[in-house]
Image (cartoon, rainbow, N blue to C red):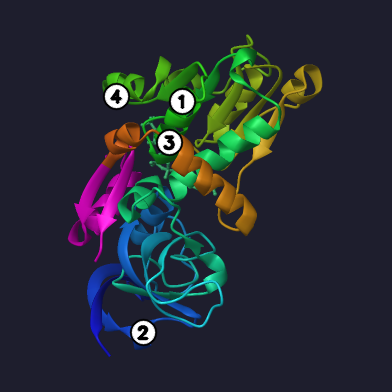
């Protein structure tokens, strides 16, 4: 049985530990498809798993990495055969089931997708859970009947993973994108992705009034807390905010005023247990709509040895856009 390297998070009496280890397939959990992992990525949740800052890991030892791309080595699942190029995001991989920061992964075939036509393994991981979540948010706004003629779209956490992909997708679809960021030094980079206006995130992150001036028709929020409350309070009549994250906080100190006086909607976005048809729709839209030059502009690539530092970096606000991890 051949050995491969894996990032292993473990729990000892002294607390959580993390390090690179050599393991073999006997270390992996049950599943009907074994995948040789070529690429993974770093999401906010991976940062939480690697640092132990929040209890997202619920089984020890754990291999973090909520996404991976690779090639099927063996399969007992009817949809997959050896040699198929596949991707995975979510389903508790990297939290309750051993994840993508390893040379090999064994998972349920029901969790896998065939790699979308037109996207390389590295591009799929440049998108990763963050980018796929941004796409789910944009689709939710469209299904709500919103379009660029209704007014601007706000994106919070704009220099982060979800945010940078959301800015790119919304700008490509013709929206006037307002990008909220705490990193003014990234203003030109965000404008390069298609942002029309930059706002300082401090303007939105403090407690605000129940209703404010109507500024945007739609929004993608990866921040939560007062920021989401302020977004709702400043949404135009009939508009909607797609909420997918909690980088500022899990709380939502809002009032019902935007809902009952302006018909504003709050659209919840979960990517982890999203049914297969929704995943396939989001990934085929990403393959079709996401500008490859913009994807390249938001992507940094790190070697496998750099993944632990990158996972710490995402929580420290050191990471811009998306990170691809070269595993195989
Ligand atoms: P990133 O760290 O890449 O992006 C988060 C961004 O939020 C930062 O870059 C920063 O943007 C902003 N931010 C950070 N801290 C604060 C703060 N205290 N107040 C206001 N803004 C802040 O993470 P991801 O893009 O990977 O994930 C973003 C969020 O979305 C996370 O909470 C994550 O858990 C969640 N998520 C949820 C998913 C779902 O299924 N619902 C799937 C994927 C992610 P800037 O520097 O521009 O200010």
Distance of label 2 from label 1 (alpha carbons): 44 Å
Within 10 angstroms of label 3, few (less than 14), some, or many (20 or more) residues? Answer: many
Distance (Cα) linking label 1 and label 3: 8 Å
Q: Which label is found at residue 290?
A: 3
Pinpoint residue 240: horizontal percent, then vertical percent.
67, 27
Which label number is shown at residue 172?
Answer: 1
> Which sits earlier in the primary sequence, circle 4 or circle 2?
2
Considering the numbered disc 3 on the image, is that residue within a helix, a strand or a loop?
loop
Q: CA distance from mark 3 to mark 4?
A: 17 Å
Q: Which residues are magenta?
A: 300-328
Q: Which residue is mark 4?
A: 189
The quarter of the displayed image where residue 198 is located = top left
Residue 297 lies left or right of residue 211; in this view the side is left
Estimate the spatial distance between the alpha carbons at disc 2 and disc 3, rounded to whole Å: 37 Å
Question: Do residues under tags 1 and 3 come within 8 Å of each other at their CB atoms?
Answer: yes
List the residue tagged with mark 2.
27
Could you say where residue 106 lies in the image, as x and y percent from the top left?
43, 77
User: Sequence-wise, which precedes: disc 1 or disc 3?
Assistant: 1
């Amino acid at each position: 049985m051949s050995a491969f390297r894996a990032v292993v998070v473990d729990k000892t009496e002294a607390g959580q530990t993390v390090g690179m280890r050599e393991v073999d397939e006997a270390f992996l959990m049950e599943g009907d498809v074994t995948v040789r992992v070529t690429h993974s990525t770093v999401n906010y949740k991976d940062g939480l798993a690697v640092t132990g800052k929040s209890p997202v890991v619920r089984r020890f030892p754990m291999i973090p990495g909520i996404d991976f791309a690779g090639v099927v080595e063996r399969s007992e699942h009817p949809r997959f055969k050896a040699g198929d190029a596949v991707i995975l995001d979510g389903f508790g991989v990297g939290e309750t089931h051993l994840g993508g920061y390893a040379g090999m992964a064994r998972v349920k075939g029901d969790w896998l997708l065939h790699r979308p036509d037109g996207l390389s393994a590295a591009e799929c991981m440049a998108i990763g859970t963050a980018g796929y979540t941004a796409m789910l948010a944009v689709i939710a706004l469209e299904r709500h009947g919103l379009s660029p003629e209704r007014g601007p779209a706000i994106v919070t956490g704009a220099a982060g993973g979800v945010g940078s992909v959301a800015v790119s997708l919304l700008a490509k679809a013709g929206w006037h994108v307002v990008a909220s960021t705490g990193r003014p030094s990234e203003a030109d980079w965000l404008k390069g992705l298609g942002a029309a206006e930059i706002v300082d995130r401090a303007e939105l992150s403090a407690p605000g009034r129940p209703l404010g001036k109507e500024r945007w028709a739609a929004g993608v929020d990866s921040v939560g807390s007062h920021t989401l409350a302020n977004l709702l309070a400043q949404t135009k009549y009939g508009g909607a905010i797609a909420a997918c994250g909690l980088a500022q906080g899990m709380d939502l100190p809002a009032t019902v005023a935007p809902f009952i006086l302006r018909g504003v909607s709050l659209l919840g976005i979960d990517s982890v247990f999203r049914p297969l048809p929704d995943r396939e729709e989001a990934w085929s839209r990403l393959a079709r709509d996401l500008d490859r030059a913009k994807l390249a502009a938001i992507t940094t690539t790190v070697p496998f040895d750099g993944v632990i530092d990158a996972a710490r970096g995402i929580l420290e606000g050191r990471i811009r856009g998306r990170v691809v991890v070269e595993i195989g």
